[in-house]
Image (spheres, helix red, strand yellow):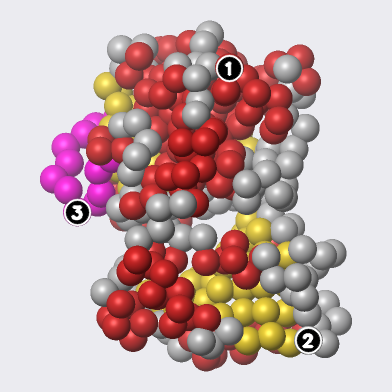
Amino acid sequence: METLLGYSDTKKISEIVEVLKRERVFLLTTHRNIDGDAIGSELALYSALKRAGKEVIIVNQDSTPVIYRFLPYAKSVHSCTSEISINPDVAIIIDCGSADRTGNVFKFMKKAKIIVNIDHHISNQGFANINWTNPAFSATGEMVYFLIYHFNKDISKKEADCLYTAILTDTGSFIYNIGPFTMGIVQELINRGASPEKIAKKVYLERPLRSVKLLSLALNNLQFDGEKKVCWMKVTRDMYRTTRTKEEDTEGFIDLLVKIKEANIVFLIKEAHNTVKVSLRSKGRTDVERIASRFGGGGHKKAAGCYFTGLSSDEVEQKILNEIERFF
């Protein structure tokens, strides 16, 4: 399968592997609002570096969502609120389109001699010393698979579980963004001990009751434009307070909207502290990455996101609808 990699990918992998072998202390991080691809890729690379005898720390802006805390080494992840003392030789930013999306972790990144950027989003800004970006990959987990394989010459069972989770979740259970490497990598991960049934149960079949109650409130404001086949809903701060939930409890809500047969475009609006966040999905020809990029966000043609400050969720809703209108 490695022979299918292009010259540019092979060159970048070799460049990064040289850094991994030469340097000693590593900081790993990813974007705010951590998803399965982000945490799965981080933890897999963390494991590979530890196996190679490196000093490694993961620092993220946000805490790891509950549904991913079953993954190996999940308890090793630090948040920015932790007391952290590290002077990394290398900072590796995973699955993150821009440096500012790492949040307050950026202050730790700046201490590094070398910053490496590994990402599969088309909107990536190429902000690091070494930038390996390629939207042909369905998940950053696929890229990390090749990186670990070239670095350590094998993939451990723990790494296989992490990478399988990354790819499973970022493809919406292998529904969209399937790339030329996806199924081949998945087969290799299973051969190396990944547990598809266990992972699927943990991610999709162990939703806390509080999250279901939150979803119930959100579905009460579900809206649908039958003419444009657009469906959307909001999660407000009042809903969080009523159900005693957090933003991490909305994991998977957008995927439920995607399942609505009559909708070609769906989006989820979430009120957060001083911001309003939007996740967008497309099942048709509409490029939602173009919509997100209009507001400083990014992602893929079929899946993208952005966030706003200083606006109410109603104002954000209207801005997104106005932008969607441009496609009709």
Q: Position of residue 218 (x, y in %)?
A: 48, 80
Dot 3: element: loop
Q: Amino acid at mark 2?
A: Gly
**Residue at coordinates 39% horizontally, 33% vertically from top-left?**
43
Q: Amino acid at mark 3?
A: Thr
- Secondary structure mainly formed by the magenta segment: loop
* Disc number for residue 76: none
List the single residue furthest toward the top. 153
Q: Nearer the viewer, residue 129 or 322?
A: 322
**Residue at coordinates 56% horizontally, 73% vertically from top-left?**
268
Within the image, what quadrant is residue 24 found in?
Answer: top left
Q: Is residue 84 magenta?
A: yes
Q: Position of residue 130 (x, y in %)?
A: 54, 32
* Disc number for residue 191: 1
Residue placed under numbered mark 2 in the picture: 226
Q: Is residue 294 above or below residue 122?
A: below
Q: Is residue 70 magenta?
A: no
Dot 1: element: helix
* Disc number for residue 81: 3
**Residue at coordinates 44% horizontally, 82% vertically from top-left?**
217
Q: Would residue 312 be found to the left or right of residue 47 on screen? A: right
Mark 3 or mark 1: which comes first in sequence? 3
User: How dense is the environment of label 3, judged by Cα within 10 Å: few (below 14), some, or many (20 and up)?
Assistant: few
Q: Is residue 90 above or below residue 199?
A: above
Q: Where does the magenta region start and end?
A: 77-88
